[in-house]
Amino acid sequence: MYKNKMEGKTISSGRLQLSGNKLLHHPEEIEKWQRGEPFAPIMIEFGPVSYCNHKCIHCYVMDEMRGDRLDSDVYLKFVKDAGDFGVKSIILGGCGEPMLHPKTPEALEVGVKHGLNFGMYTNGVPITERNTPQLIDNLTFIRFSINGFSNESHQFIHDTKNSDLDKVKKNLEGCIEYKRKNDSECTIGVYCVLFNENLDDVYEGTKWLRDIGVDYALFKPISQGTGNIQHIQAANLENHPTLVSDLETLQTDDFHVTVRADLIRDGYVRLGYDRCYGLPFECAIDADGSVYTCNWYWGKEEFKYGNLNDNSFPEIWESEKAKSLRSHVSSPEFKIGNCCGSCKQNSINKTLYQINHNPDKAREIEETLKSPGITPQHVNFL
């Protein structure tokens, strides 16, 4: 274990885990959940703006981009309150590009001082030489979304300028250079959605990522959502039969490659539980200040706990409305079949179902996790 060089909570220097969940590394919260006691969510997904400089053809929150930007004072108060309340991590992403909010770099510094770990999803274009230090010094991880490694495929999939990929490459290399020079612990990764349009350039692009010093590359199919159902397609790997194995050969001790071939083959499937158990452990906040049960229900008034412009996050989380809504969504009467096939709660729900219905197996897993070297990196990001 190591103490993050930033003023924050202890995180692990162990293996990188890019699938499943890390819930069992938080036994105190699980025990409170079992006893029906209140506790702060471990993680929040937060979008400080609901607009983006790209219009990715597969974006599942495109319908929720309403041009909102959270008030700067509310933004800074929120990260202070969340850290003081006991929230462990915030992922900046949501329904837009988080670096388009001018207060994001400052919010990272403030939140870290109040005990938060931060991760960020970004298309990489708004990053500059000036704000790079604030990002790399304060983020636990930063994940660049690069869905094409040629100017042509990147332009098509991101629906942006042909020159944007060159800017992204420059900014990614700048982040890596700063990390090296300052011995930063920030993990720098790249996420790529596989399309037929980018299969020809993925291998060479991944070689480039390895050579410049990226920590990991993650490849997945499209995540389904209400805003992109018309674009759902599986990348046809029949014409690239060795692509998955070829990508995996690029892995080294310092460069991790994960290809979710199972999801490409089988799609996102919900199995192994009877209801949504995971809402007490995380939530989602939109750029207009609305706090929701989860990111599947962005913009859905009936799944909103409250709004940061009206109340503090702790007040919203502990409100009777939030308690009632969590109880409703986690009840047997609630139809989880109406939710997203790629639900981010899916893995957590499986774990909590097993804890409830197979406690011996759950204890066995928990004991295994106590073994030396098992605790993964970024344990506060479920």
Image: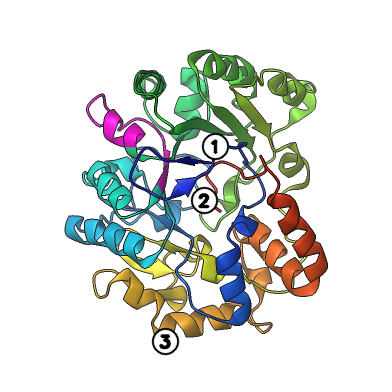
Q: Identify residue for label 2.
A: 381
User: In this orientation, which residue lies closer to the viewer: 114 or 159?
Assistant: 114
Instruction: State whether residue 366 appears in this view.
Output: yes
Magenta stretch holds residue 126: yes
Q: Identify residue for label 1.
A: 13
In the rendered view, tell whether residue 126 sits above or below residue 173. below
User: In this orientation, which residue lies closer to the viewer: 165 or 319?
Assistant: 319
Say what secondary structure mark 2 lies in: loop
Residue 301: mark: none
Looking at the image, tell me whether mark 1 or mark 2 is earlier in sequence order. Answer: 1
The amino acid sitting under disc 1 is Ser
The magenta region covers 118-137
User: In this orientation, which residue lies closer to the viewer: 151 or 304?
Assistant: 304
Disc 3 and disc 1: Cα gap in Å?
39 Å
In the rendered view, tell whether residue 208 sits above or below residue 335. above
The amino acid sitting under disc 2 is Phe
Say what secondary structure mark 1 lies in: loop
User: Which one is in front in this view, the residue at disc 3 or the one at disc 1?
Assistant: 1
Disc 1 and disc 2: Cα gap in Å?
14 Å
Q: Are marks 1 and 2 in contact (CB under 8 Å)?
A: no
User: In this orientation, which residue lies closer to the viewer: 225 or 11?
Assistant: 11
Residue 349 in picture, x, y percent from top left: 67, 65
Say what secondary structure mark 3 lies in: helix
Q: Identify residue for label 3.
A: 320
How many neighbours does mark 2 have within 10 angstroms: few (below 14), some (14-19), or many (20 or more)? Answer: many
**Side (left or right) of 68 relative to 90:** left
Q: Residue at horizontal 44%, vertical 71%?
A: 300
Q: Farthest left residue?
A: 73
Looking at the image, tell me whether mark 3 or mark 2 is earlier in sequence order. Answer: 3
Disc 3 and disc 2: Cα gap in Å?
27 Å
User: Which one is in front in this view, the residue at disc 3 or the one at disc 2?
Assistant: 2
Residue 258 in picture, x, y percent from top left: 66, 33
